[in-house]
């Protein structure tokens, strides 16, 4: 783990600790964030902490064509109960991700500083959102960084206020990315939910080879 200032580059991946913590410090400028995601590095920290930069090994990823659509979800998609939009309510999505209560988690890592930084990324065309609506109300969604030149989407967070809403967001995103020949969705770290949707762990070296 290395302390860095805003004008210093990220250290070599070999210096990350066993949990994947690579560096501490710097800032959340658009330039820094785009550079980080392009190198497989992402910020993750709590209020009161300096910015913590991570590059875990292994890495959880979802190959778009491997998205798992269960029989239940096929039925939900056929019913057209939800309306899906892209990039129409980015701020609402990230604020819902920030505020939603999650089992086993106290508070949130999406600080106000993070909200401001990712909103600026959105305004400059780097961050994108998927919104799920039911009867005109936002009930789910996700957001992340779209590395268009590398054909990689870096997922950051998702939320659901009603059953299956976030699943519809992820399935729709994966299907759209598959149509555009994207290589993978970066899910960062393992969760049972992501595994159930078709994501799997790969080595950091394999993940980084996709970004080069």
Image (tube, rainbow, N blue to C red):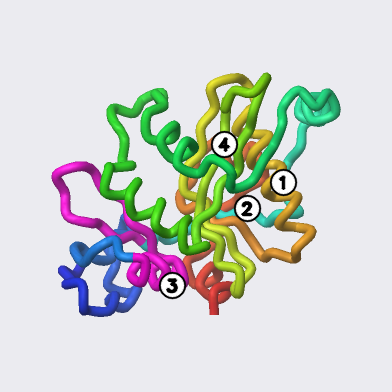
Which circle's residue, 4 or 1, is located before the other in the chain? 1
Crowd band around label 1 with a 10 angstrom C-alpha radius: few (<14), some (14–19), many (20+): many
Image vertical order of residue 101 relative to residue 60, above or below: above
Q: CA distance from mark 4 to mark 2?
A: 17 Å
Instruction: Check residue 62 in the rendering and tell me which mark sits there, or answer none.
Output: 2
- Which residue is identified by label 4? 141
Q: CA distance from mark 3 to mark 4?
A: 25 Å
Crowd band around label 3 with a 10 angstrom C-alpha radius: few (<14), some (14–19), many (20+): some
Q: CA distance from mark 3 to mark 2?
A: 18 Å
Q: Residue drawn at (49%, 45%), measured in percent from left and top?
A: 190
- Residue 47: x and y, percent? 20, 42
Callout in the foreground (3, 4): 4
53 and 128: which is toward the camera: 128
- Residue 184: x and y, percent? 63, 60
Work out whether residue 60 can be spotted: no
Cβ–Cβ below 8 Å for labels 3 and 2? no
Which circle's residue, 2 or 1, is located before the other in the chain? 2
Q: Residue drawn at (79%, 30%), measured in percent from left and top?
A: 77
Q: Secondary structure at mark 2?
A: strand
- Residue 75 within the segment the image draws in magenta: no
- Residue 81: x and y, percent? 76, 23
Instruction: Check residue 39 in the rendering and tell me which mark sits there, or answer none.
Output: 3
Which circle's residue, 1 or 3, is located before the other in the chain? 3
Q: CA distance from mark 1 to mark 3?
A: 24 Å
Cβ–Cβ below 8 Å for labels 2 and 1? yes
Instruction: Answer with the quarter of the image where residue 201 lies.
Output: bottom right
Q: Quarter of the image containing the N terminus?
A: bottom left
Image mark count? 4
Q: Quarter of the image containing the C terminus?
A: bottom right
- Residue 38 within the segment the image draws in magenta: yes
Q: CA distance from mark 2 to mark 1?
A: 7 Å
Find the magenta span and give its range: 30-54
């Amino acid at each position: 783990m290395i302390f860095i200032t805003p004008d210093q580059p990220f250290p070599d991946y070999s210096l990350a600790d066993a949990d994947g913590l690579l560096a501490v410090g710097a800032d959340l400028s658009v330039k820094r964030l785009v550079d980080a995601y392009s190198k497989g590095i992402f910020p993750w920290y709590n209020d009161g902490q300096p910015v913590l930069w991570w590059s875990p090994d292994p890495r959880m990823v979802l190959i778009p064509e491997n998205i798992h659509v269960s029989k239940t979800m096929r039925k939900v998609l056929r019913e057209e109960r939800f309306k899906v939009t892209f990039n129409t309510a980015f701020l609402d999505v990230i604020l819902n991700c920030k505020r939603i209560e999650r089992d086993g988690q106290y508070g949130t890592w999406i600080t106000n500083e993070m909200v401001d930084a990712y909103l600026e990324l959105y305004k400059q065309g780097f961050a994108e959102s998927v919104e799920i609506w039911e009867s005109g109300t936002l009930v789910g969604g996700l957001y992340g960084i779209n590395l268009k030149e590398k054909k990689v989407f870096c997922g950051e967070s998702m939320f659901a206020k009603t059953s299956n809403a976030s699943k519809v967001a992820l399935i729709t995103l994966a299907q759209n990315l598959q149509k555009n020949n994207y290589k993978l969705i970066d899910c960062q770290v393992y969760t049972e939910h992501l595994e159930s949707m078709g994501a799997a762990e790969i080595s950091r070296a394999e993940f980084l080879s996709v970004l080069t």
